Structures are given as structure tokens and as C-alpha cells.
Image (tube, grey):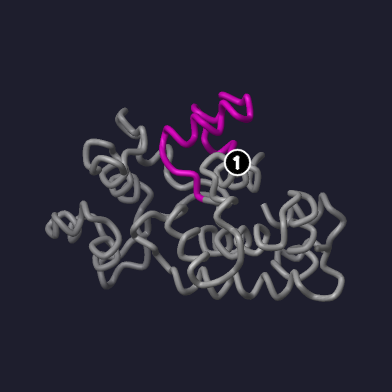
Amino acid sequence: MLVDFQKNNGLLPDGKLGEKTAKKMREVFKMTIFEAAHFLGQGSVESDFFQLKRESGNYSVALLRSTFSYYRDRPQEAYADGRGVNEKSLSIQRQKIIFNKVYDDKNRKPGYKLGNTKIGDGWLFRGNAAGQTTGREEHQDLANHLKDQSIMTNPDVVWDKYYFEAFIFYLKSKNVFGKMKDVSRQSCNTVTLAINGKAMMHALLRYERTQHYYNLLNLPDAKK
């Protein structure tokens, strides 16, 4: 994760995504300045500034209905599964219920399948590491690329050993890097669509953070 990256690259391990860390990531992962800005902007939203290990299922009733079509179509289930007004957090068991419903292929429309066909796949293969790798299919692709099949029985291996590499692989395999021609709003929306799909969640925030990191990377000592 972020602190580990900083330790391994001679940086102050403060867990903050500042100028030196941003520039070092660009250097280590051999990205152009535009690619690095998008990588940092999108990744910081996906993983809470590269602090999040696995996707949280601590959804309120309202957020369940606004986020997932499954629950928009099933309001009674949203009230049963989601966090109530007087609840601070959902138990792991209730979070499992949510992911095993919304990420199960039988509950997803064509074009949005994740390869989750076995009981429990939704929870097991929920969002993972920097880019929130999601679903059995994406995890299998990553396991094949890294030649580490332990990922398929213990997906926590991804955030523990391949936190940033998983996101880099996704961006390369889906040709998302090829869409990072500049940091305009149009380019940011194109990248957001490729990463987040038609939901386009937090599109404005992704654009603002991409701009922020582009400016950091463009400071005098940034390599171009």
C-alpha cells in the first residue's frame, strides 16, 4: 500500500499522497505525465488515496438504492439489507449478503457480468487494491498475468502483494492508458467511463483530482 511504496522507494512513510510520492510513482511505473495524473486521480478516488484494501459494503439504505440497480428494483430488500438510520455500521455478514447479491452474474445485465457464477463469489471477489479489481474474471486475468494462482483462493493476496500493480495491469489490459491523451474534462470522463462504467460515480471529483496531480507533477523538478 502507500506507506509500503514510500518505504521501498526511500520516501518518508507518512501515508500521504504528496508531490514526492506522486513523482516517484510516475518514475517507478514508467508513466507519462498524463498517465500518472490520471492514475493518481482515478486511483485516489477508487481507493481513498490508496489506503483502502478491499471494497466496503457498509451501505445505507439510500446509498444501496442509488448505487445498485438490483436494490433500486427491490426496495424492500434495500431496507432489509442496508444500514438503518440508527446503525453506525453493518456487520460483515450483512455486507456479504449485499455483495453476493449485487455482484452475482445472475443478477447483472448482459455486458455487466463479472464472472461471478459460484456461491459467495460476490463477496470473495469484491473490489480489491488500488483500482478496486472486481469479480472472478478480473481476478483470474490478474492471476494469469502475475502467474500467481493463489489469488483465486485468497484474493487478499492482491492488496497485500500487488496493490499498485493490479491497477497498472487493468489500465494496460483494457487500453485505458491509451485514452489518457491530456487532462481535459472530456479525457477524464472517457477514462472514468472506462474504469467505472456508465455509473460514472464521482466523475467531477475524479477530474478535479486528476488536475491536482497533473499540477503537482508539472512542478519544476517533474520529469517530462
Residue 107 x %, y %: 22, 41
Secondary structure character of the magenta stretch overall:
helix
- In the image as oriented, which residue stretches furthest toward the front? 181
For the residue labelled by badge 1, is the local secondary structure a helix, a strand or a loop?
helix
Location of the C terminus by quadrant is bottom right
Residue under pointer 1: 169
Using a 10 Å C-alpha cutoff, classify the residue at mark 1 as few (fewer than 14 neighbours), some (14 to 19) or many (20 or more).
Answer: some
Q: Residue at x 68, y 70 (%)?
A: 214
Tell me: 23 left or right of 169: right
Residue 199 x %, y %: 34, 60
Residue nearest the viewer, comparing 136 with 178:
178
Residue 185 x %, y %: 50, 72
Residue nearest the viewer, comparing 46 with 12:
46
Q: Is residue 111 magenta?
A: no
**Which range of residues does the magenta coloring cover?**
132-158
Q: Residue at x 14, y 55 (%)?
A: 73
Q: Residue at x 46, y 65 (%)?
A: 189
Q: Is residue 141 above or below residue 196?
A: above
Tally of numbered tags: 1
Residue nearest the viewer, comparing 31 with 103:
31
Tell me: 159 left or right of 152: right
Tell me: 216 left or right of 197: right
Q: Amino acid at mark 1?
A: Phe
Q: Quadrant of residue 136?
A: top left
